Amino acid sequence: MEQFFSQNAIYIVLIIVLLVWFGIFGFLFSLDKRLKAIENDTKGVKK
Amino acid sequence: MAWKVFLFVLMTLVCIAGITFPIVREPVTWYDFPLIPGLEENAKIIFFHVPTAWLATIAFLMATLYSIKYLRKKDLDDDVKAYTAAQIGMIFCVLATVTGSVWAKFAWGSFWNWDPRETSIFALLLIYGALFALRSAVDGDEKRATLSSVYSIIAFVTVPFFIFIMPRIMKGLHPGSADDTNAGPVVDFKMNQNMQVVFYLSLIAFTILYFWMWNVGYRSQIIKDKLQKQIN
């Protein structure tokens, strides 16, 4: 097991980097969506 | 919507290519990266370190442009845009410092040794850190916006010197410094074509990511201000 990890260290790095990127993307995506909903709501309130 | 998918795919590809493509002495296949003397395997961090520094510059530039726009039009939304750009610029400036520091540990042997490049980015962090101190110290939206716009414009005057000029005219360890044997600007040094393609794709992906982050950032801030006014 240890040997597997030390030989494939770069792939472990890749997996972690991809997980972080997926997390950032998902967070921004959902934030954008919720923001749009609030923007539409507040527009309705104002007019 | 389509550009979000594009960004997702592009960044994923950049991560996969940048991290897993092997670095070999004599590139044979299309995916081989050349060995850069002195950098070896460490060279891969270039796909993440340079874009963060690049984004810090772009973000500070956007902050300045919107500060100028605020001073001309006196629209508080422009001030919010400038502020958010400066915030994101600060984040990426810190990221550039951290990734550079990690790189320095493995390439030069120590996390921090006051290389001209390290000193200049430290000064830049201090200058832009002061912008946030200034903003939090002033009451009143208009006054705060005007003061921070003026400060932001003056602060940006130093950016070209600290990022592009000072580290190039002084001797140092960072690629591109005055006694660098690789010569030429940082981007061109000993990269082969596929490495350059991944590098530029990385710059594009990070730039799109910046504009998205900025967009979400200032929109939420504008909504927050609007709601706060309604409540008061």
Image (tube, grey):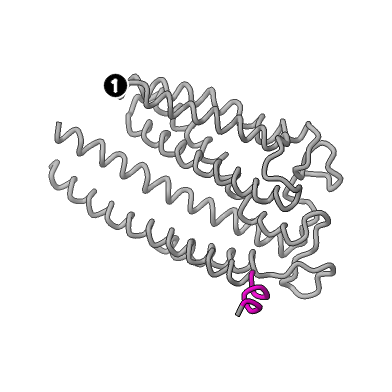
Taking depth in this image into account, of B20 and B224 the one nearest to the observer is: B20
Residue A24 percent across, percent down from the top left: 43, 58
Residue B160 percent across, percent down from the top left: 64, 32
Q: Amino acid at mark 1?
A: Gly
Residue B101 percent across, percent down from the top left: 65, 46
Taking depth in this image into account, of A43 and B43 the one nearest to the observer is: B43
Q: Is residue B177 left or right of residue B50?
A: right
**Residue range (magenta):** A2-9
- The part of the image, by quadrant, that contains residue B33 is bottom right
- The part of the image, by quadrant, that contains residue B121 is top right
Which residue appears at 37% of the width and 45% of the height? B217
Numbered disc total: 1
Which residue appears at 54% of the width and 27% of the height? B127
Secondary structure category for the residue under label 1: loop
Taking depth in this image into account, of B124 and B108 the one nearest to the observer is: B108
Which residue appears at 73% of the width and 36% of the height? B115
Q: Is residue B223 above or below residue B201?
A: above
Q: Is residue B190 left or right of residue A6?
A: right
Is residue A46 a member of the stretch shown in magenta?
Answer: no
Q: Quadrant of the C terminus of chain B?
A: top left
Q: Is residue B8 above or below residue B101?
A: below
Q: Which residue is mark 1?
A: B140
Name the chain letter of the residue that bears numbered label 1. B
